[in-house]
Image (spheres, rainbow, N blue to C red):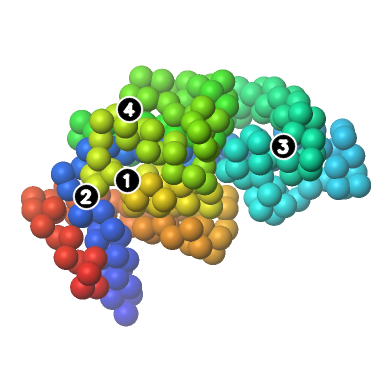
Amino acid sequence: MLDLVKLSFRISSMSSLTGLAPLEAVLFDVDGTLCDSDPLHYDALREMLLKIGFNGGVPITEEFFIENFSGKNNVDTALVAFPGDLEKGLKLLEDKEVTFRRLAEEKLKPVKGLDKLTSWVENHGLKRAAVTNSSRVNAELMISKLGLSDFFDVLIIGDECERGKPYPDPYLKALEVLKASKDHAFVFEDSFSGITAGVAAEMPVIGIATRNPEDLLMKAKPAFLIKDYEDPKLWAALEELDKPGADKLEFLDKNI
């Protein structure tokens, strides 16, 4: 029975990516996808919200943070904190981001297995983009702290697009800049809004369950979920994508 389960997830994950061959590009979210940054955002935001008496002065829970703030663009986040007063909300976020950057300088760590995956991407000569709803200064700090400043070909910021995630605009802009086809690219994302954006851009999205609940992520319809970049499901899919004739296996999607 265990062997059948292993075969099932191997076929499921492989069939999600084999139709992309020959692969051209891999697109990554930043927060929660490259690094486990959500706890730092949570701590920084909780501190700022306490100062303004949000929620009657009761500290927000991590579950409240995930449901209301995680993965959202700055405008949506600001309006949760100050409904109807965008200016005040954005000022709060500016102060929160200062605190976040201080914490990131001290505590930011990569998602497990990231080095292995980035080496695979480099060894295959693939184009790569970082696509995020974070501010540019935050994204550049995180990417630098992870030693990936020279890894990415382009950094796309949601607030610099007409619409940020959960709309597909940031991912579509990344494909345009990379001169890559959506039919030969896939996405790594850790949030509901991010997965929604990648799916709306008509690319397979591999969801990373670093912090967000798996049942919530599955509602956004990722190709499959992984725990981190050492997950066997990921490497089963990449192994099949590497095999000669992988582009001929798209029929599996229709026959499994």
Tell me the element at label 3.
Answer: helix
Mark 1 in CB contact with mark 2 (< 8 angstroms): yes
Residue behind mark 4: 177
Circle 3: is it few (<14), some (14-19), or many (20+) Cα within 10 Å?
A: many
Name the residue located 32 percent from the left edge and 80 percent from the top edge.
Answer: 1
Q: CA distance from mark 1 to mark 2?
A: 8 Å
Amino acid type of the residue that numbered disc 2 sits on in the rendered structure: Leu
Q: Amino acid at mark 4?
A: Val
Residue 189 spot, x, y in % from top left: 45, 46
Instruction: Give the mark nearer the N terminus: 1 vs 2.
Output: 2
Q: For the residue carrying disc 2, how many other residues have a C-alpha within 10 Å: few (<14), some (14-19), or many (20+)? A: many
| Mark in the foreground, 1 or 4 | 4
Residue type beneath disc 3: Ala
Q: Position of residue 68 (x, y in %)?
A: 68, 49
Q: Which numbered disc flags the more N-terminal residue, 4 or 3?
A: 3
Circle 3 residue: 78
- Mark 1 lies on a secondary structure that is strand
Residue 23 vertical position relative to residue 246 in the rendered view, above or below: above
* Depicted 148 relative to depicted 228: above or below: above
Residue 20's mark? 2
Above or below for 79 versus 237 = above
5 left or right, relative to 209: left
Relative to 168, is 251 on the left or the right?
left
The residue sitting at 33% across, 73% down in the picture is: 5
Rendered residue at 44%/44% (across/down): 168
Q: On residue 186, which mark appears? A: 1
Q: Of tags 1 and 3, which is closer to the observer?
A: 3
Of 17 and 226, the residue lying toward us: 17
**Which image quadrant is residue 39 in?**
top right
